[in-house]
Each structure stands twice: as C-alpha cells, then as structure tokens.
Amino acid sequence: MKNKKFNILFLALFLMIGAVLSGCSNGGSASEDSGGKKELTFMFRGQPQEQAAYKAVVKKFEEANPDVKVNIVVTAGDQYDTKLQAAIAGRKIPDVFFYNPGQLKAYVNSNVLRDITEYVEGSEGVNLDDIWETGVAKYQYDGKETGTGAIYGLPKDLGPFALGYNKTMFEKAGIALPDKDKPMTWDEFINVSKQLTQDTNGDGKMDQYGTGFNVNWALQPFVWSNGADFVDETYTKVTVDDPKFVEALQYFADMQNKYKVTPSIGEAQSLDTYQRWLRGQLAFFPVGPWDMGTFEKELKFEYDLMPWPAGSTGESAAWIGSLGIGVSKTSKNPEAAAELAMYLSADQEGQQALIDQRVQIPNSVKVAEEWAADTSIVPENKQEFLDIINDYGRSHSTDFTYNGEWLDYFFANVQPVLDGKKTAAEYTKEVQPKMQELLDKAVKQEEQSKK
Ligand code: CA
C-alpha cells in the first residue's frame, strides 16, 4: 500500500521532470479559451454540504467575473488525494485545487504549484493582515523552510478539531456540564464517560457510551497534552517510543478495553461512531467547523464545544488542520486562477457565502470574532474553535516533513493496540525503527529535490 503510493509519487515527479526538460508541458486540462472566455478547472473535495456550498460560491465568482468559466471537478474526501496525484502524474494539473500543506515543499520543488505572491499582494479584495497568520504561513515557502517566503496558496480554511459534547445527555443524567475554560483531567474524563455509558432500557445491552474516537483524528490531542509528539522538534527523529507517548496511546486504547466507555470493535462495526453520535448515543465526539451545517440540520439534541481533556501537562491540546487552495504552475490563466483562489479564501463576498452555509469558520479574524459571539449560530461556544487557533492548537508534524509515509505506517498498523492485543509499549517499540527508516527516506528525498 505505502509502496504503491510512493511509486505513484515517484512516477509523478519523473513525468514532471521529463515534461519540464522537454519544454512540452501542456498546462491545465481545460484552460483553452472557449467562446472568448477563460476556462479554469477547479478541483476540490468535501462532504455533500461543503460541495454544495463551494459550487454556489463558484457560481457567484462567475457572475462577478463574466469572462471566466470554471469547470468543477469534485470528489469525496477519501478519493481526493489519489485523483490529484493522477492528475499531476498525467500533467493535467487543475488550474486551481485544494492541497494538503504537507505537500507544499514537494509540489513547489516539482513545479506543480505557482508562486501567487504578486497577485495576492496586488489584490484589492485580500487583506493579508486580516487573515489568520497561522493560516497564511502554512502555504509560504522560501525554498528551505515553510512558514515564510513566497505564497503558494491561501488557506481554504483553518480546521480546528474541537471536542463536542451532547448537552442533552448530560442534562438528562443530571451531570454538571463540562467547564469551557477548565479542561478535565484524564481521570475526570473517564469518570464522566463511565457515568454516561448506560443501558437505558435495561435489556442488558448498552444504549449510550462516553465516546468513540477514530485514532487517526483523535489520538493527537492526547499525545500532545501529555507532553509527547510523533517526532522531535527538528522533524528528523521519530519519538513514538517516548514513555509519555506510550502512556497517551495506552490511555486511548484503554477507553475501550479497560474502561469500556466506547463501543467495542463489534459494536462499532454494526454502527460506526459518527452515526452513533448523530443518533445521540455518544456523550463526546470531535467536531470540526465543517460539521456545523450537518449537525444543525440533523442532531435531535443540543451540543456544544469544550476543551480536550488534559494529560500530564495540565493543558489541552488540539489539532488545527488546513487545506490550501493552490494555483497550478502550468495554468494558462494564472491571473484568473489566482483570482478564484483569492475569492474562495479571502474575498468578503465569497467568505460570507461559505460562512452562511456553516461549513467553516471565517478566514477573516475580525469576522470570526463577531461570528463566535453570535449566539444565534449553533454551537454556542464557537469561541472554542478560535481558542484552538489562538491558544492551544497546533499543526500536525507531517506539515513539516517531506511526506507523510512515516506516519501512515503508524496508523496503518495500530489496530492491535486498540483491540487490546498488544500494549502501546510493545507496539511503539516495534514500529519506531520502521517509521524512522521512512522518515530518513523523506529527509533524503527533500535534500535531493533541492539539488
Ligand atoms: Ca439497552
């Protein structure tokens, strides 16, 4: 699996180098002028509600720019990376596309992304000072380090993963609501989860649980708040065998195996934890800004946001994800493409339409603060999203390494720990060398790409 991905990437790089050397790079797929209009291809991903929201905003962009026609290519989240890699390998890079900040360096070094600094700085609609600093910096690269230098995209959004809770369930059980300013300790979190894991109709089967976390998205807050990380601060040494990391992973697995506050593997298979949350059967569940629209429509209970429980550091930690909107280096209409990217990320009109659809937090700091204070928008404690960005959130370490293969290996093989068949200590000791080998490869690849 990982080898296949690796090979595709290599093939892509090989084809790109070939195209550049022979000077026959053929540009974006549909960028020929037709009917006097500049055509752009915009490729993106999202849940159904997000897809609809983005399509509507693109339509608004076309109305405001009658000389531009945008062809949309949209996929579900899990198919997107494969499809984008194929487009890159075939040199049919969309003019405008979403990309993961972890790919920034590789895409710049292999001539996939265009430097759009001049368009952004010359734009009247974009005020960089008003966009979250962390959001813009994720897409800057000076050829050596990310976070500074030329702009190779703008944030689609910042995606702070907050922790949500089912307020109605707490109230029914007569349990005090979580404090929005003071995180629970890990012990407190287990205790409350135990109280809320109940067989409500007395048939001997549990009807509701404390929680049910997906390891890929929810392990990080536990690791970080325990003072550990997947990699050291130079991004060259894999640190999953650090005792604080081991403790966090074991705690995570124990929620199921020892404390039994999450559905068992069998139960999770019959109904996944996202569905259980939607049906009101989980007390706690991660909530991203993109969930707000769906939750507002579908939840038959009240929910709100709270800080993630704190490990040995005593502090919450949370993951801020992001996707960038980039412009292809081979686009034949780079200016129009940059305009579209800016419209989606930073333009007031475009932003407002997306915010109204409840699929993201505002990219403008000022607008975000007003939005967070507006109690008519569910959930009430939207400030938690902003606190994550301003205060206790962080990027994933793969945003800074040349690829994410080394981390994929960790998540691809972690299931036996979650099932209680291996201890966290055994597992991390076993995978550290393999992960290190993959990270060493990524480091080497980065060095070579600069030569
Ligand atoms: Ca029952």
Image (cartoon, helix red, strand yellow):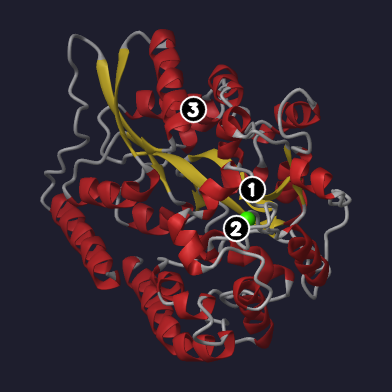
Q: Is residue 196 left or right of residue 183?
A: left
What x and y, as percent, mark residue 57?
46, 20
What x and y, as percent, mark residue 407?
46, 71
Quadrant hosting residue 409: bottom left
Q: Is residue 174 left or right of residue 151?
A: right
Quadrant hosting residue 93: top left
What x and y, as percent, mark residue 252?
63, 72
Identify the mark nearer the N-term, 1 or 3.
1
**What residue is disc 1 on?**
134
**What residue is disc 3 on?**
344
Residue 199 numbered mark, or none: none
Compare residues 198 and 286 and report the one nearer the observer: 198
Q: CA distance from mark 2 to mark 3?
A: 22 Å
What x and y, as percent, mark residue 387?
77, 47
Q: Residues within 10 Å of mark 2 (few under 14, many from 20)?
A: some
Please report contact status of discs 1 and 2: CB closer than 8 Å, yes or no. yes
Q: Does the residue tagged 1 have its C-beta within 8 Å of any atom of ligand 1? A: no
Secondary structure of the residue carrying numbered label 3? helix
Residue at (56, 61) in percent of width and height: 396
Going by the numbered disc 3, the residue's amino acid type is Leu
Q: Is residue 332 visible?
A: yes
**What residue is disc 2 on?**
395
- Up the image or down, 349 lies above or below 304; here it is above
- Up the image or down, 250 lies above or below 345; here it is below
Identify the mark nearer the N-term, 2 or 3.
3
